[in-house]
Image (cartoon, rainbow, N blue to C red):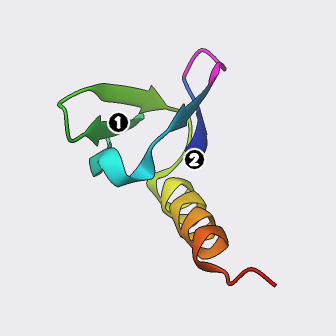
Amino acid sequence: MIQITRLDDSELMINSDMIEFIEQTPDTIITLSDGKKILTKLSPEEIINRIVEFRQRVLQPIT
C-alpha cells in the first residue's frame, strides 16, 4: 500500500498492485485495474518512487 494525497489534501492508501496506469493532464490521474480513477497532487515520478520504496520494504529479508 502507498499513501497518496488527493487534490483536497485528504490522504488515501491505495494498493499499488491495482494501478493500471498514471496520467498527468495537468493533475495526476491514477487509474486502477477496476476502472476507478483517483486525482492526486503527486507527480507520476513521486508515485513511482513510493511504489519502488514500498516494494523494497516488502522484499527486504527479515533479520
Across and down, in percent, residue 3 comes to: 62, 40
Return the residue found at the far front.
Answer: 63
User: Who is closer to the viewer here, 6 or 36?
Assistant: 36
As drawn, the label of residue 29 is 1
Give the SS element for disc 2.
strand
Q: Residues within 10 Å of mark 1 (few under 14, many from 20)?
A: many
In this picture, is 29 found above or below 48?
above
Q: Quadrant of residue 41?
A: top right
- Left or right, 52 with respect to 15, comes to right
Q: Which residues are magenta?
A: 7-11
* First reached walking from the N terminus: tag 2 or tag 1: 2
Separation of marks 2 and 1 at Cα, in angstroms: 15 Å
Q: Quadrant of residue 32?
A: top left
Across and down, in percent, residue 63 comes to: 82, 85
| Residue 48 seen | yes
Dot 2 amino acid type: Ile
Residue drawn at the location 42% of the way across and 34% of the way down:
27
Give the SS element for disc 1.
strand
As drawn, the label of residue 2 is 2
- Left or right, 59 with respect to 9, comes to left
Residue 10 sits inside the magenta stretch: yes
User: Who is closer to the viewer here, 55 or 36?
Assistant: 55
In this picture, is 29 found above or below 51?
above
Task: For marks 2 and 1, give the one nearer the viewer.
Answer: 2
Dot 1 amino acid type: Ile
